[in-house]
Amino acid sequence: MNYLLGLDLGTGGIKAVLFNEHGVEITEATQEYPLYQLQNGWSEQDPEDWYQAMVKTVSQVVEQSGIPREEILGIGISGQMMGAVLLDERGDPLRKAILWNDQRTEAACAEVARRVGEEKMLSITCNPPRAGLTAAKIYWVKQNEPDIYAKCRHILLPKDYLRYRLTGEFATEVSDASAMQLMDVPNRCWSGYILDALEIKEDMLGKVYESYEVTGTLRPDVAKCLGLCEKTVVVGGAGDNAAASVGTGVVAPGRAMTTIGTSGVVFAYSDKPAIDPKGRVYTFCTAVPGAWHMMGLVNSAGLSLKWYRNNFYPTDEEYLDINTDAAQSPVGANRLIYLPYLMGECTPHLDLDCRGAFIGLSNIHTRKDMTRAVMEGVSFGLKESISIYDEIGVKPALMRMCGGGSKSPLWRQMLSDIFEIPVCLPDIASENSAALGAAILASVGTGLYPSVVHACDQIITLRDEQYTPDAKHSEQYRKIYDVYREMYPGLKDAYKSLAGL
């Protein structure tokens, strides 16, 4: 039997999962690491923390499994997107990595937009200039830390830093690189026009591969440290959501996925680089060659519930009391609405200044109502992506769900009622779908399967259970959703004033 490792580098921690060639999970290990927020709205991590956590989890998985190391053929890496890791000429980090949810880059993004041109940026990258994407973070360092930028010789994404430590290769792949806003997304290569406009040398960036392609093999010292063979290959891998789409089988037209992790995503496959002319959702290359995806992002999805748990249910580690209490509050939480903007918002508002809110609080409300309102507010935020897809003619018939939020039967049914689409789950540990997707990409890169689509068709099955919309609840949610959509426009100016205090 052959085996593949899937690594999932998240914001909260890294997960290493070992699968056999049929996608059956053998064993897993996780390790958390710190998040540094030196100022309000900043979000950073130390790349060395990622590496040490990876060493610990991979070594643990290899030891636990008892699998002969020569049978572990390949590694695929999934990772948090949109970050910026700056390295010096020796390959050492020059500063902590700036993460996807960092909010310091609005002025830098404006300068990027001025240099490139908004229409040109949209046509080349399929997205308007966005403060959350990597180009703005690179330019922020250039503007605010010129001494550090002057020493920069390599710019990598978070998961690609792990690749570098594993193989010694400076490389990336199309799905993750799409979010750097330095890439010609329709043509799946770096954009010379944008690099020239921003004065970034192409040799500072990694070589671009397709997600299944082999990017290198393990360095001898690393292989020994991990308990693996030097011949073990590392494939391109994918950004976390593109990897999860492979792990849930969203690799063909008409398929879509919702994931609720720290952030929340609604992901839809496309066989062409479809663009929202208003720039409210992302369009990126996906992990299937010759294919793309649209992606709407709620910055604080699972983060909202985690924040709420930490403050109001501090001992409820498994969210059991939270789900029990939320189920005892009626649809609409007794006219209480939660806005999930703890870290600003991406879709559809592109506003780093907006903040979370409970609206409609009165003396009748209980903790149960507030709990349900948080889950419903996140769901409404995700629904906004569905509404945009509907506008541009993308109408998923079935929504696959993954991520930590998918473990909640209440949330599955809630999403079905609010989306008005049946919701199903892949027949795996749904919180491991990104790791499985990365392992599937490795299985293609090692030649076990001829293509990503073929591998998914052979490996991915759906559970028999399906959550279908409750017509009465959907009708109620439709009315509440209309009110929810009025909230942000009414508060937009107040958010700006609050940010300026």
Image (tube, rainbow, N blue to C red):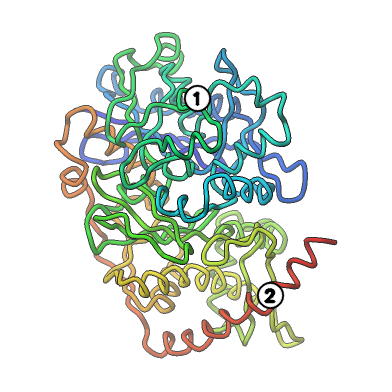
User: Of circles 1 and 2, which is in front?
Assistant: 1
Question: Spatial distance from mark 1 to mark 2, Cα to Cα?
Answer: 51 Å
Contact between marks 1 and 2 (CB within 8 A): the answer is: no
Instruction: Write the residue at 36% across / 35% down.
Output: 173
Q: Amino acid at mark 1?
A: Met
Q: Quadrant of the C terminus?
A: bottom right
The answer to which of marks 1 and 2 sits earlier in the sequence is 1
Q: Secondary structure at mark 2?
A: helix
Instruction: Write the residue at 25% across / 34% down.
Output: 20
- State which quadrant residue 283 falls in: bottom left
- How crowded is the residue under tag 2: few (<14 C-alpha within 10 Å), some, or many (20+)? some
Q: Which mark is residue 204?
A: 1
Instruction: Write the residue at 63% across / 77% down.
Output: 489
Q: Which mark is residue 367?
A: 2
Residue 107 higher or lower than 14, as above or below: below
Q: Is residue 201 left or right of residue 460?
A: right
Provide residue 118's location: percent of width, then percent of height. 51, 54
Q: Is residue 245 left or right of residue 162?
A: left
Of residue 443 and residue 2, the one placed in the foreground of this image is: 443
Q: Is residue 427 left or right of residue 38?
A: left
Provide residue 292's location: percent of width, then percent of height. 31, 51
Q: Secondary structure at mark 1?
A: helix
Q: Which mark is residue 246?
A: none
